[in-house]
Image (cartoon, rainbow, N blue to C red):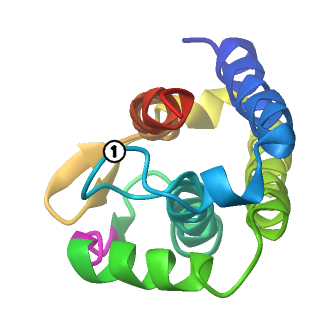
Amino acid sequence: MTKEELLKAHSEYINWLDSLASLDEAKAKAPYAEGKWSPNEIIMHLGEWDHFTLKQRLPNMKEGEKLERFPDFETFNAKAAALAHEQTFKETLSYAKKQRQYIIEKLQQTDEIEWDKIFLIGNSESSIRSYFTDFLEHDDHHRKQVSSV
């Protein structure tokens, strides 16, 4: 994907978050299926990964850099779900939207020539382009879950 296409897709994610504002609080806090997360927990999960990326990844996505491996997913995701229980769905939507807007701003400021330079996350090679393409796949997975509500 080109820089423009990726930025457009990330902007569409924000539009999707906006579309969720009409979701009733009770539905937003109920699991989308038995034993699964609620939309509130899912959106907080996405917002927290955006926040992690904004603070821990983006500033270091430079050619030749070696970034730490991802944190333990189970622990990270459990903390995100717990945070969701402390606020309303509208607050969670606002938080997630702000995190993604900050990411979009940082990506807009990054020259596309930098987007394909390789850095390491743990022992795995990545680039800005591949990282944020994977991000969209992760978004889509969770968008389908929330859309089932």
Residue at the image point whose x is 48% and y is 28% from the top = 148
Q: What stretch of residues is rendered in magenta? A: 67-73
Looking at this view, is 111 or 134 the one in front? 134
Residue position for label 1? 33
Q: Is residue 97 left or right of residue 10?
A: right
Q: Name the residue nearer the viewer: 41 or 98.
A: 41
Residue 59 vertical placement versus 144 (above, below): below
Of all residues, the one furthest to the front in this rendering is: 26
Residue 103 location, x and y as percent? 73, 51
Q: Residues within 10 Å of mark 1 (few under 14, many from 20)?
A: few
- Left or right: where does residue 54 sit relative to residue 66? right
Above or below: residue 61 compared with residue 116: below
In this picture, is 66 found above or below 134? below
Image vertical order of residue 56 relative to residue 16, above or below: below
Asked whether, in this view, residue 120 is left or right of residue 142, the answer is: left
Q: Position of residue 86 (x, y in %)?
A: 66, 88
Q: Amino acid at mark 1?
A: Ala
Quarter of the image with the N terminus is: top right
Relative to the observer, which residue lies in front, 6 or 93? 93
Q: Residue at x 77, y 49 (%)?
A: 24
Where is residue 73? Give x, y as percent. 25, 70
Residue in view at x 68 percent, y 21 percent: 9
Judge left or right: residue 80 versus residue 87: left
Q: Is residue 109 visible?
A: no
